[in-house]
Every structure is written in structure tokens, then in C-alpha cells.
Image: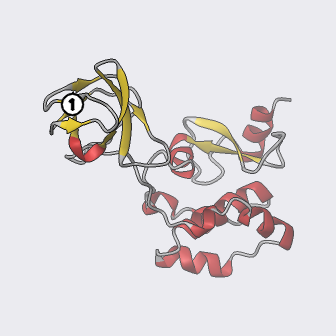
Amino acid sequence: MSLLQQLLTRSNHQCELCTATTNLSVYEVPPTSNANADNSILVCKTCLDQIEKTEQINPEHWKVLTETMWSEFAPVQVVAWRMLSRLRNEGWAADSLDILYLDDETLELAKKTGDHEQDGTVEFHQDSNGARLLEGDTVVLIKTLDVKGSTISAKLGTVVKNIRLVHDNTEQIEGKVEGQTIVILTKYLRKG
């Protein structure tokens, strides 16, 4: 039986965190080296996007953890504990963390990624107007910029196509201007 089939059977064909029944997929709980039913869970797309921080966390969506955190399966307990920790500023999440018991081995695994030390907010690349930027977007410069270490001057209104996000800095993107790849601060552009 495939891992997906095992998890579908175990979870009764629903997300093991929020009980949704659509858009389900296997999530390998980090750190994982070899995916199996002992280190994977079945999650919906909404949960997955918020776990992986590709979408802003929605505290209302996670209130169901007050029930699903009691799962008998360690990987579900680990992710529930991590998400409750990220939501610890919410009263209900702090209360749930206080009463959730994990054995020493499971708690050690839950703490391994350090994810519990962060809060629930996620930083995204945004243009000068606050619009979210994505890999491959087209942007327009809202200010003339002199490119350091070059004779290029990127003029106001210059269109930069197919941008790349600088993954360790949400205030920067990379794009080509006059055939040269440059780094541009997001505060100097708008989505085109």
C-alpha cells in the first residue's frame, strides 16, 4: 500500500490537522530523511501553505487544533505543537499548549526545526504599494536608480520582466536592466 493510501486510511480521508476533505496531500514532517507513515501526515492545501509559510497564518483556521492535537500519531502531535507554538500569542493556543502533553522523544522532535521559536507572521516580498511579488512577475521602477559598480542608470518607468526573489531578504529582487542582472529594492518598484 502506498504512503498516500496508508495516510488516507489512517485519517479517514481528511486532513489530520483541520479535518478538511479536499485538496489533500502528504506532508513529510521535517526533519525527514525517508518518508513513511511514522513521519508524515495528510494535510489540506490551506494547512500546507501556512505550515510552509507560503501564506500568512490564519488563527481562525487553526482553532480546530484544540481537538486534533490529541491525535495518537506522533507526526500529527509534532505539527500541532509547532503550529500552536507559532500561534502562542492567541489565548486559546497558549491554553492548548499548556495542556498538550508530548512524551520526551516527540517533544524533542517537535523542537528540532526551531520553528516553534518564531511567531505566526510571514514576511513576503511586496512592492511600494504593498502588493505581493512572486517569482517571474513584471515590475516597473518608480524612481531612477544608479546601479552601483556600473555605468547603468535604471530610469523611472523601466519595465523589469521575469523577476527573481532574493530568498533571504524580502526587501530585494533581482532583475535584468539593459542586459545586466541587478538587485533592486522593492520599495522602488511597483507590480506591472
Q: Which residue occupies 67% across, 58% down? A: 79
Q: Is residue 127 above or below residue 155?
A: below
Residue located beneath label 1 in the image: 153
Q: Which residue occupies 28% across, 35% down? A: 147
Q: Which residue occupies 45% across, 63% down? A: 59
Q: Quadrant of residue 48?
A: top right
Sort mark 1 into few (<14), some (14-19) or many (20+) by Cα contacts within 10 Å: few
* Residue 192 visible in the displayed image: no
Left or right of 154, for residue 169: right
Colouring style: secondary structure
Where is residue 178 shown, x and y percent of the image? Answer: 28, 19
The three-letter code of the residue at mark 1 reads Ser
Q: Which residue occupies 36% across, 49% down? A: 171
Where is residue 100 shown, x and y percent of the image? Answer: 69, 75
Where is residue 80 shown, x and y percent of the image? Answer: 64, 62
Nearer to us in this view, 3 or 22:
3
| SS assignment at label 1 | strand
Quarter of the image where the N terminus is located: top right
Count of numbered tags: 1
Left or right of 72, for residue 161: left
